[in-house]
Image: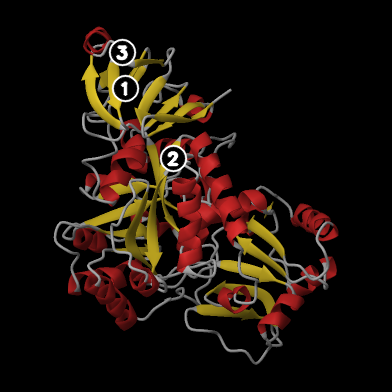
Amino acid sequence: MGEIWYGGKIYTMKAETETVEAVYTEDGIIKDMGLQEDLFFTYPNARKQDLQGAVMYPGFTDSHMHLIGHGEKLLRLDLSNFTSPQDVKQALMRKVQETPEGEWIFGEGWNENNFVDRKIFHRTELDEITSNHPMILSRVCRHAVLVNSKALELAGITKETENPPGGVIVKDIDDEPTGFLLDQAQELVKRKIPKASESYLYNALKTSIEDCLRLGLVGSHSEDLSYYGSFTKTFGAFENVIERDKLKYRAHLLVHHEVVDDMHEEGHTFKETTGFITLGAMKIFADGALGGRTALLSRPYNDAPETSGVAIHTQEQLDSLVKKARDYGMTVAVHTIGDRAFEYMLDALEKHPAPKGERDRLIHAQILTKDLIDRAKKLPLILDIQPRFVATDFPWIIERLGEERLNYSYAWKTLLDEGLICAGGSDAPIEPVDPILGIHAAVTRQIPGDEDKIVYQPEQCLSIYEAIGLFTKGSAQAIFEEDKQGVIDTGYYADFTVLDTDLFTATEDDILETNVLKTIVDGTVVYERD
């Protein structure tokens, strides 16, 4: 016995504004759709799921996030909303008081661009908060951390320590470490953090998935498998939460290149799936982030002409990593924010093409040029974009890049108009995981709450159909599953997001007021708003 979903507006997303009266699902698959009266007659014993005037869409999927990292942010001290260094200091002092001596103090998401003075704490200021606890505070981009002297001591970082490949130990005029570590330099400290326990990973992942379901997400493409001690332990957390404990959620897992051998040695293969957990592309980082000026640009930063960013790998190393993926029959998913990093990856992908019938993905693709776009169009390629970055990075990004580089930066509309396939993600915990915020950013290119309602690059605003498509059809295309998910049609997964708002007719402000009423995965209501 299946279910009939009816009584509201149902957008199929097969074409702009296309709707259907009712949908019949059975065993987690859409079996039929059409007029309510016809489905009631054809399937008289089906359970009736009355939407009561709500609006149903294909299930929203986040194309790029870190599920366990998002859970950690929810469980740890969240610094992302603080707007002054004084408030950050007070929060850290409270955290120290409740943390046993010697244990690590973690903070997530600080952003100096939220501060009037753009202050970045020095290690000595963190030492004033505590010298008895090692402290590590992750910047919002997660490509930089601040640590105190205790953490530097544990990591053996002194004035004599040289920058590791792909990283920067920021030092003062006396060559003393300031406690500000960029990209691969973070790993010197992170290696000293006690490995996460299985119960910790389980709790973080379960907390994360429950939050995603609450926000209307039916699944995520996530990259977690190399950060918590071992592939086995981390993959096991996904198996325990989703399969053993039956928390329905579609987790498509990117596999960091450092654990891809482990994955295969343990008998797993590319695209292996349980239906809910799937092993996906090999993940590579080509550069850093714009906040810490480690994204790799073809020309120096406008506000720091002494640097053009950081290459995590050389061109030869990138070529070798892509070839390794091909030897395993895998696609690649590569973090590329700067235009030079994007160029390096195009060079590598042109040398080692994707397996026939598959698509690689370049993640972020924030700073581009017309030449790079033209080259990308010739490859089987997905651009995995994060629309919410517009609301976070403007206006300070104009200082970083200068006006002349903005024509092909954060240029989501240009990418779609050029025929490139784009998927939509949040990069949570870097940004809020809420897909409604991503859709709002794509459509308005405004900062929520901005009284002046400034629109950054208005020519790059997407239609609501294009914006929703990023989180539905685009995410499905990113993993070559557009025949299974991303639209409402017969033969597709019975994964739906039900909202109290018709996004196609909503005002810009109404979008932000949208509430998720139900999240349905595999035909099962896994979240329902009280």
| Identity, as a three-letter code, of the amino acid under mark 2 | Lys
Upstream in the sequence, badge 1 or badge 3? 1
Q: Which mark is residue 45?
A: 3
Q: Residue at x 20, y 59 (%)?
A: 374
Image quadrant in which you'd find residue 137: bottom right
Work out whether residue 227 or residue 307 is closer to the camera in this orientation and state it. Answer: 227
Alpha-carbon span between mark 2 and mark 1: 18 Å
Query: Dot 1 corresponds to which residue?
Result: 2
For the view shown, which residue lies furthest in the left direction?
Answer: 356
Upstream in the sequence, badge 2 or badge 3? 3
Q: Determine whether, in the image, residue 132 is placed left or right of residue 273.
A: right
Expressed as whole percent of the image width and height from the top left, the position of residue 257 reads 38, 72
Upstream in the sequence, badge 2 or badge 1? 1
Expressed as whole percent of the image width and height from the top left, the position of residue 2 reads 31, 22
Query: Are dots 2 and 1 in contact, CB under 8 Å?
Result: no
Image quadrant where one finds the N terminus = top left
Q: Is residue 37 above or below residue 247?
A: above
Q: Which mark is residue 326?
A: none
Query: Are dots 2 and 3 in contact, CB under 8 Å?
Result: no
Residue 113: tell me if it is visible: yes
Query: Are dots 1 and 3 in contact, CB under 8 Å?
Result: no
Q: Nearer the viewer, mark 2 or mark 3?
A: 3
Identify the image's colour scheme: rainbow, by chain, secondary structure or one colour: secondary structure
Q: Which mark is residue 248?
A: 2
Number of marks in picture: 3
| Identity, as a three-letter code, of the amino acid under mark 3 | Asn
Q: Determine whether, in the image, residue 12 is placed left or right of residue 314.
A: left
Expressed as whole percent of the image width and height from the top left, the position of residue 158 reads 68, 87
Q: Is residue 371 above or below residue 444?
A: below
